Image (cartoon, rainbow, N blue to C red):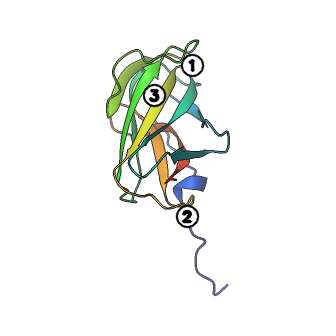
Amino acid sequence: DNGGPAPSTSANGFQLSSNTSPEADIIALVATPSGDGIVTIPATTGVGFFSVASINLGASNQLTVTADTGDVLLPVTLTLCETNPTTSVCLATPAPAVTTQIDANATPTFDVFVSASAPVPFDPENNRAIVRFKDGSDIDRGSASVAIRTE
């Protein structure tokens, strides 16, 4: 009864939103090269990456996909691109944001590139890259995250 609230992090978050009209509902899954949900950036000024697979279980909508580090300021730059789901090749030059039409039941894929400019300590609860799918009203319609660190 006298304890404080449980800590909340982006690693284990749940967000619920609703609207009177149908909206996109994105389920996003991430994959790292190591398969453990951690992007390890080689050296303190290298580049790491991860991939995102998604499905829209809701209504068709134009969404903007971005990547950020949440409330934690990290010495990294995040860019992303939509990819060919068969070859994983970027459909355009990686940028800070990708705006794309995601129809109902569509399964677009993305690559996210993480460039470090200084060391990032291993703190998987806090040091994360978060991919967000936002609609035209800037409402999150889906997200996923990975831990990031430098070697």
Counting from the top left corner in percent of width and height, residue 40 is at 54, 47
Residue wearing tag 2: 8
Inspect the image, locate mark 2, and give the three-letter code of the amino acid beneath it.
Ser
Q: Nearer the viewer, residue 21 or 10?
A: 10
Taking 84 as reference, is 143 above or below it? below
- Which comes sooner in the sequence, label 1 or label 2? 2
Q: Secondary structure at mark 1?
A: loop
Q: What separation in Å lies between label 3 and label 1 (alpha carbons)? A: 22 Å
Q: Which mark is residue 21?
A: 3
Taking 151 as reference, is 7 above or below it? below
From the viewer's perspective, is 99 left or right of 141?
left
Q: What separation in Å lies between label 2 and label 3 (alpha carbons)? A: 30 Å
- Which comes sooner in the sequence, label 2 or label 3? 2
Q: What separation in Å lies between label 1 and label 2 (alpha carbons)? A: 30 Å
Q: Are marks 2 and 3 in contact (CB under 8 Å)?
A: no
Q: Secondary structure at mark 3?
A: loop
Taking 28 as reference, is 88 above or below it? above
Counting from the top left corner in percent of width and height, residue 34 is at 65, 40
Q: Nearer the viewer, residue 72 or 104?
A: 72
Q: Which mark is residue 90?
A: none
Tell me if I can see residue 53 in this picture: yes
Inspect the image, locate mark 1, and give the three-letter code of the amino acid beneath it.
Thr
Q: Secondary structure at mark 2?
A: loop
Q: Give the class, few, some or many, for how many residues have Cα within 10 Å of label 1's Cα (few <14, many ≥20).
A: some
Tell me if I can see residue 20 in this picture: no
- Which comes sooner in the sequence, label 3 or label 1? 3
The structure residue drawn at horizontal position 61% and vertical position 35%, both measured from the top left corner, is 33
Taking 130 as reference, is 20 above or below it? above
From the viewer's perspective, is 43 left or right of 93?
right
Q: Which mark is residue 107?
A: 1
